[in-house]
Amino acid sequence: MLFYFKNSVIRIGPAGIPLSCKERTNVDGIIYTRCLGLSAIEIRLARGFISEGEAREIKRIAKKSGIETYVHAPYYINLAGDKRNVEMSKYKIAHSMELAHIMGARIMTTHLGFYKNLSKRETMKRIVKHLREIRDEMKKKGIEVPIGIETMGKKEVFGSLDEIIEVCKRVRGIIPTIDIAHIHARCNGCLKEKEDIQEIFNKLKELNLNHYLIHLTGVKYDKNGEIYHVPIKKSDLPVTKLMECILENDYDVTIISESPIVEHDAVYAQILLDRAMEMIK
């Protein structure tokens, strides 16, 4: 189901193949996603790359089903590491972009790396350098799928909201993937009111985005940030206030459920959005 509100379009869908989908292929996951009344899906490459033939079939079925596709690169990426780590990470991101291009995906999301023994400044410098190299290499091949760089929940991992915005400002073709739960965990549960969520979007204004990709889940955290994902109802993340913020500002968004109960919380997010829409009307 597509949600239209004023001038915006809101899509919601699962991260990966829905848990309740009997057949465990991406194509079946897309068809099942449509049957659930959802309108987007993130194809996850965490367990390995798919073939180009499968990518073409995903594009065909997604278009036929009215499902917008997104891609997530393999999880372990470190663009600030040693030469071996960097080269492997660059390959994973580049190949994910190639597959996303074949699929007709809107955005390819990736993690960026770790500070480890580096200063935050040096980590930023290395990540920006290597992202530019990936972007330039892909551009030469005619591949310009936007790279979505994800806000991260653990404090030892590069990816605070401010860091993500700074990278986007420094490298063209890079946009933020806004993981609301990660932001919430990294700041020790600072998202309590609608104004707190609005501040995220206020910070993003300087990037002049016309669409926001949002990852959504519940989260448990401690002083070091994220511990693990939980269902939305078991978290203190104010999801209803997120929905109100989206609607009141007429934001064009795609919400991808990364909850442990993937499609169930995608459907629940649609219910919360629908309730918020009725309240605002």
Image (spheres, helix red, strand yellow):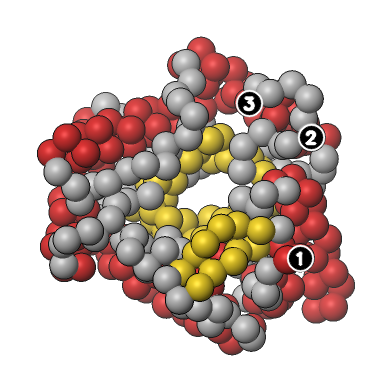
- Between marks 3 and 2 in the image, the one whose residue lies nearer the viewer: 2
Q: Which of the two labelled residues, at mark 1 and mark 2, occupies the earlier sequence position? A: 2
Q: In the structure shown, which secondary structural element does the residue marked by tag 3 occupy? A: helix
Callout 1 secondary element? helix
Quick check: marks 3 and 2 in contact, CB under 8 Å?
no
Residue 86 location (% of width, % of height): 20, 40
Q: Is residue 13 visible?
A: no
269, 84: nearer the viewer: 84
Q: Residue at x 17, y 61 (%)?
A: 117
Pair 3/1: label in front: 1
Residue labelled with disc 1? 233
- Number of marks: 3
Residue annotated with mark 3: 26
Left or right of residue 278, residue 207 in this image: left
The residue beneath circle 2 is 20
Q: Which mark is residue 60?
A: none
Tag 3: residue type?
Answer: Asn
* Residue at the (33%, 37%) spot, across then down: 93
Query: In the current view of this chain or complex, which residue is farthest to the top?
Result: 53
Give whichever of discs 3 and 1 has the lower sequence position.
Answer: 3
Contact (CB < 8 A) between labels 3 and 1? Answer: no
Residue 43 screen position, x and y as percent = 56, 35
Mark 3 neighbour density, 10 Å: few (under 14) some (14–19) many (20 or more): many
Marks 1 and 2, how far apart at CA: 19 Å
Residue type at the position of mark 2: Ser
Q: What residue is shown at x 39% (from left), y 53% (from top)?
A: 149
Quarter-of-image position of residue 252: bottom right
Residue 26 can be seen, yes or no: yes
